[in-house]
């Protein structure tokens, strides 16, 4: 069974440019999370989806970050415009339901120069 | 909100010895405590978890203990092997399975010396 798939694995962009990350959760998983992991730190929750509904986006910096999960399957996370401080690993995770364990993808490492 | 503290930040042990990583949490309403292992270039992988209705859980060479009164929980790895080298994260959540999102510690870099 395929795990959580994220793309791209690596992305280098200049500041002020837009960037988008894509996540394909495990088939049948209704809950999807986006986490941000800074170097040497633990992941921090950005947004949580139940199917296509964003049920917790309180930690998402809405002035520059946006996310969507059309049809309750794949999800995209966008940053526009990117800042130097956005350099980090962006992790996607999914779980079968809201009360079962979360499985993480390999992440997208973003470098803003 | 929840705050999770993890110690030590780096732990070096001889192969075959035991390793212990400790975490404390602040939210008394938290009742789900997973541990994740993250290898270089990979996402975190769940290795064991414990819920607040039990004090200890064991799975082969790894075990987790929970003290709800003191609000701390620990990961124990016995008979360490080279493949145990990785960064380990503890986490806490109010809801089973981390449904409300997990609050992670800062991680422990475990180094197994041959």
Image (cartoon, coloured by chain):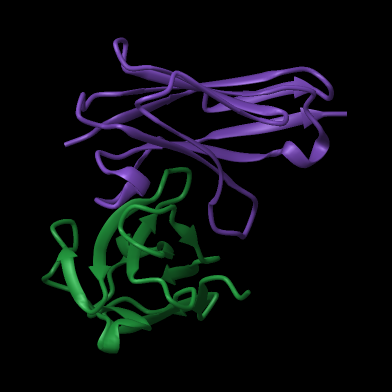
Report the front residue among B113 and A31. A31
Quadrant for residue B112, please give it. top right
Figure quadrant of the N terminus of chain A:
bottom right
The answer to whether residue B78 is above or below residue B70 is: below
Regarding residue A7, the answer to whether it shows in the image is yes
Residue B57 placed where, x, y %?
54, 26
Is residue A26 shown left or right of residue B95?
A: right
The furthest residue to the bottom: A71
Residue B61 placed where, x, y %?
72, 28
The furthest residue to the right: B114
Query: Which chain did the image draw in green?
Result: A
The furthest residue to the front: B53
Is residue B102 shown left or right of residue B80?
A: left
Residue at image coords 26%, 32%:
B30
Residue A24 placed where, x, y %?
45, 80
Quadrant for residue B34, please give it. top left
Residue A91 placed where, x, y %?
43, 63
Q: Colour of chain B?
A: purple
Figure quadrant of the C terminus of chain A:
bottom left
Is residue B110 shown left or right of residue A72?
A: right
Residue at image coords 49%, 73%:
A26
């Amino acid at each position: 069974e395929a795990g959580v798939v994220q793309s791209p694995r690596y992305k280098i962009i200049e500041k002020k440019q837009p960037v988008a990350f894509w996540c394909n959760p495990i088939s049948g998983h209704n809950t999807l999370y986006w986490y941000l992991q800074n170097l040497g730190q633990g992941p921090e929750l950005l947004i949580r989806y139940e199917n296509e509904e964003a049920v917790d986006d309180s930690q998402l910096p809405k002035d520059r970050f946006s996310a969507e999960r059309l049809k309750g399957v794949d999800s995209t996370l966008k940053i526009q415009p990117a800042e130097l401080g956005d350099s980090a690993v962006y992790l996607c995770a999914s779980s079968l339901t809201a009360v079962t364990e979360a499985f993480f993808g390999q992440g997208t490492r973003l470098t803003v120069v | 909100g929840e705050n999770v503290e993890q110690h030590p930040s780096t732990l070096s042990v001889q192969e075959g010895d035991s390793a212990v990583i400790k975490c404390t949490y602040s939210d008394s309403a938290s009742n789900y405590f997973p541990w994740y292992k993250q290898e270089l270039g990979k996402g975190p992988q769940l290795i064991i978890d414990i819920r607040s209705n039990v004090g200890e859980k064991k799975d082969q060479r790894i075990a987790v203990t929970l003290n709800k009164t003191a609000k701390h929980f620990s990961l124990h790895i016995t008979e360490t092997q080279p493949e145990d080298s990785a960064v380990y994260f503890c986490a806490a959540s109010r809801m089973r399975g981390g449904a409300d999102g997990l609050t992670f510690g800062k991680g422990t870099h475990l180094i197994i010396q041959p």
